[in-house]
Amino acid sequence: MENPLSIRDFRRIKSYKFNTEGLETTTSNEQIATEKLVEQCFDRFSQLIAMDPDLPNLQRESHIANLEKCFRGLPEGYSSLDSSRPWLVYWILNSAALLNHTFTDTQKQRTVDFLKKCQSPIGGFAGGPGQYPHLAPTYAAVNALSIIGTPSALEAINREALVRFLRAIREPNGAFRMHIDGELDVRGAYCAIAAAKLAAIPAEEFEAIFEGTAEWIASCQTYEGGFGGAPDLEAHGGYSFCAAAALALLGKPQVCNLRALLKWTVNRQMAFEGGFQGRTNKLVDSCYSFWQGSLVVVVQTLMASVDPFAKTPTTRPMFYSEALQEYILICCQRPSGGFIDKPGKSADVYHTCYALSGLSIAQHAEFNMEPRVIGRRCNELIPTHPVHNIPPAAVAAAYSYNRSRGQTKSPSQETTAEIEDIWDDDSERDK
């Protein structure tokens, strides 16, 4: 065998399947049905590995071909995501980067030109040309432009306008709305902070914009240990990642209970399936391979920074990395390209991005050590940044380049009404 890492004994782990304890519920029935589908994948794999002990294989070429096809034009089924087009760009670009695939210079420049059309005159990026700016596509667009990494891509980010937009959607308590008069949740804080960091917003401006944000995020931690989208909401893997990543970028991890967060997160890994669930008593989902897997790495790192003498191990991740890789490669990989949520689902670029991101985290989560890769060594992916989820080299290059562009012009403290006037004036000119 190329690799000494062993696959779990799938006959033995059948005892880890869900125990109803004599009480049947809708939730337990869904869990049992999912486990049956996963078990079929494991049983089929057990027969195949008897003939080829180097399995499982990452179907790299199939995934690259699928991404190239999607980059040229997405199927009609994606039309419902018209207001999320920067996300589609980011998911495809990041998936390709993890697979060590580069698009042509022409493709990349066309992407830059498109994302510039999504940038709003009032700052930030919209889900598509002519739409209102929103923090989610702003985060996606900044990530996508950072992955491309050319001067034209990085200079496409209007830093002064971004600051103006962030001020307009900031609440007095440090929370952020997703857009003007929009919903308020932890995603907003994370998206705002991550975009501001990659754009290298000057420290003084950054501190002013995010004053009180760490404390507001801390108020979203639940009795379980994870974070909800807002205070008093259920703990959720995506929001918990956003919270921990935001606190890491702010340099204020001490405001929350990190040990409770770590305990909640590691308990979201499913004993039989090997993948992660997003919430207590929910089903496994490949996208949480990143949201929860990276969260473990981030929290362990934060705990070490707060208490360097803590007994929390920082060289090994506190999740079963090989089991996570098994779930992704054996149960969620389509031979024709792309990844799925769970057996029985269809492939899409969202789950492709976050399944690959989780696979990368699982392979590279051991700090300062060799990657742990199941199957052939060629299954190894490029590392991803556990906070930004783009290649670490792209993070460093974007921050360095944007910082070299000098200070942003300090915007006046516009009110939301004044921001809307800018939008209205620009819209009239477009007519």
Image (tube, helix red, strand yellow):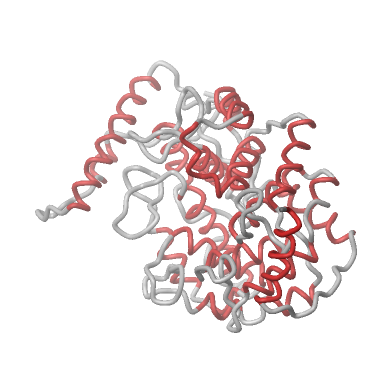
Q: How far from the left and from the top, in percent, is residue 216?
A: 54, 79
Q: How far from the left and from the top, in percent, is residue 168?
A: 66, 73
Q: Residue at x 38, y 44 (%)?
A: 274
Q: Residue at x 48, y 43 (%)?
A: 80
Tell whether 21 sits left or right of 341. left
Q: How far from the left and from the top, in percent, is residue 423?
A: 70, 64
* Closer to the camera in the image, 153 or 300: 153
* Closer to the camera in the image, 2 or 344: 344
Quadrant housing residue 64: top right
Number of labels in the image equals 0
Q: Residue at x 57, y 30 (%)?
A: 379
Tell whether 397 sits left or right of 359. right
Residue pushed farthest top?
Answer: 51
Q: Is residue 126 above or below residue 48?
A: below
* Closer to the camera in the image, 44 or 181: 181
Q: Residue at x 60, y 67 (%)?
A: 246
Q: Is residue 398 above or below residue 273?
A: below
Q: Is residue 47 above or below residue 287?
A: above
Q: How far from the left and from the top, in percent, is residue 137?
A: 61, 54
Q: Is residue 239 above or below residue 107?
A: below
